[in-house]
Image: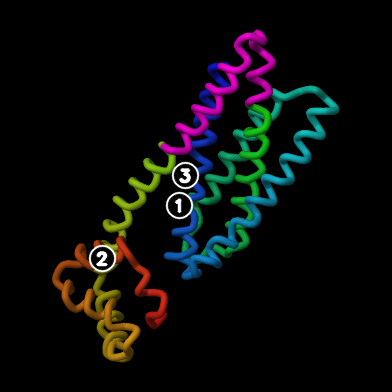
Amino acid sequence: VIKITILAFIVGFGFFGAILTIPFYYELVKDLSPVESGLQFIPMVLGLLLSTFLVAKIIKRTGNVRVWFPIGTFLLVVAYFILAIMQNTTPLFFGYIAIFILGFGVGSLLQTGLPAAQTVVKQKYLGATTATVILFRQIGAVLGSVALLSIFFNILPLKFNNVFRQPAIQKSLSITLNEVGNQANNQQIKKIILANQGDPSKISKNLSESTSFLINADPR
């Protein structure tokens, strides 16, 4: 039961952490709108649905629940490995594969962990066991969301800072501002860049907070 509880914590941590952080990749790197970014999760939903159907059918025939623990864990590792190596030039198709595998792995673990824990305890402990597994899954979800988002928003300004200090980027910004800087929908980003040209860290700070003004700005 302890092992299953720990696994439930890890699944909650990784799954909800991924749901909250992956959209930033699609919006900041792939330049998709929030709606388009959300639609990229359709493969994950398909993976969850497919795993729910297939795993239930297989368990019903074989009666073997525990075999899905290493399988599900392996699928999660594969999915996170693919997500970790994705860059701005990576085709969206690889992202679809990764989150499909993630959904399938999570689905195979979510529905097998609880029944496995319930079968190894006495009936009088059934309620406590069920509540404990679900509780730790939710704790993992909360901590995963907080921890991964905190890491993300601490690393992002440093990345922006390094980018804006590059001479090539500064030259490109200067040329672009001369070309499209007077357009009404570019005024806010122009103001941020001009006001903080001497300190790129301030530009990165502004861009790591609210970026809704970028939606209507010139793509350049």
> Which quadrant is the C terminus positioned in?
bottom left
**Residue that badge 2 annotates:** 206
Residue 69: % across, % down? 64, 28
Judge whether 19 appears above or below 72 on screen.
below
Farthest residue to the right: give it: 61
Q: Amino acid at mark 2?
A: Asn
Query: In the rendered view, does 180 fall on the left or right side of 56?
Result: left
Judge whether 156 appears above or below 193 on screen.
above
Residue 169: % across, % down? 29, 74
Q: CA distance from mark 2 to mark 3?
A: 24 Å
Query: In the rendered view, does 76 fall on the left or right side of 150?
Result: right
Residue drawn where x is 68% and y is 29% of the image: 112
Describe the element under mark 1 as helix, strand or loop.
helix
Query: In the rendered view, does 174 fall on the left or right side of 37?
Result: left
Mark 1 or mark 2: which comes first in sequence? 1
Q: Nearer the viewer, residue 171 or 104?
A: 104
User: Is there a contact, CB below 8 Å, between mark 3 and mark 1?
Assistant: yes
**Residue that badge 3 annotates:** 17
**Residue that badge 1 annotates:** 21
